[in-house]
Image (cartoon, rainbow, N blue to C red):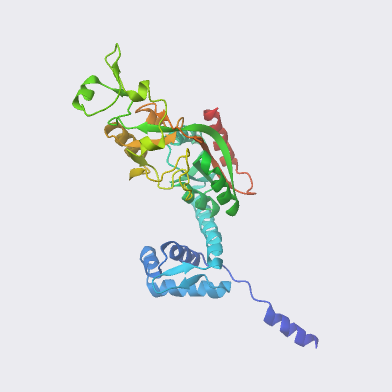
Amino acid sequence: MIKAEENWLEEKVKEPYMLDLKQLIYFITCAETGSISEAAKLLYTTQPSVSKAIKALENDMGMVLFDRMPRGIALTAKGREAYRYACRIVNDSRILEEMGHKNMAKYLRISLNPSSWFTNQFVEFYKKNYEKDYHFEIYTAGVRTVMERVRDYLSDVGFVYIMEQQKKEFQYELVKNRLVFNVMQESTATFYPGKENILYKEMPPSEKAKRPDMKIASEVENNGTVNTLAQKDQQTVNMEQMKNFRFIQNFRDEFLELGEKEKRGVFSWENLDVSVITNSDYIMEKMLKETDLCNISGSYLSDDKKAVNEGIPLEFKKNRIFFGYIRRKNDEPDELVEELLEFLNSKLN
């Protein structure tokens, strides 16, 4: 009888299996491409090899990771959960490998909305700590992608800009993804017109003469500079005025527009003409200096825009922008993250 019970236990208890890093990389690539054939191309292997690896992983884990469809594949509910852990395992293994090859003291992965201000501060932080041999991985993206990268352990911390009226929706996304957001600074949402724009603050008389179609109130100061309507009378810019202009922004989801419909007196990207989308500070600055494109950013964290003009505040009930960082909830404090945050706070205060 005892022997029979031992046999029953042997049948029920499964042997633990070792995760195959290669299988996880194949799994992540398939999840991100939504296609086994596309994944095979990126992995420089054959489609049967990828299919075999995914099938073996599903068998080892005892769950279906993908729904097979006529055109491509899609993660199942379990697959989406497994994807997050797989990303963490693969990225942590890469860090360990880098540490082994380079004998790194510390390694920090950062995701952020494009920001010339952050760029300048990071360069100074790196130079200040050069002798410590810190290593970094920096990725620029929109708000949603920054959140996802922190959630999926692809980044240790994420820096984003959030507009005031979107805080409620943003908070919902944070709770859903087990993230927390800490505000570092507040500023006013500011409209930055390009040099060729009718609302640009300073324009030489010669340039104004070339554009007689401009219907702007102006007067010539003693220094010969024409102060446009923006400088003298244009204290703020409202939604109706902005509908007449074209914009250059960093990402379509900048400031996390979570499908909120346009409300009276509240800012919305709806009906605005975003002609250029770029994550390049250089392109942003160049376009503002040489075209009539406009940009909306925080009033204090926009060194590249301030190089062009001071900007005009937006005329909305909730026109504040919050700058801060995203972390995973209940994460243990990281010394390098804390050191960077202390440095940035010193620059903001």
At 63% across and 72% down in the image, what residue appears? 16
- Identify which residue, 51 or 20, lies in the foreground: 51
Q: Where 125 sits versus 328, above or below? A: above
Question: In screen coordinates, is 194 left or right of 85?
Answer: left
On the image, the x and y values in percent for residue 18 come to 58, 68
Quarter of the image with the C terminus in it: top right
- Do we see residue 72 in this rendering? yes
Q: Is residue 51 above or below residue 145?
A: below
> x and y percent of residue 287 in the render?
30, 36
Nearer to the camera, 133 or 178:
178
**Residue extending furthest front?**
264
Q: Quadrant of residue 196?
A: top left
Q: Is residue 75 above or below residue 312?
A: below
Residue closer to the observer: 99 or 305: 305
Q: Position of residue 221 (x, y in %)?
A: 30, 13
Question: Residue 57, position in %: x, y?
Answer: 52, 71
Q: Is residue 281 left or right of residue 13?
A: left
- Residue 240: which quarter of the image? top left
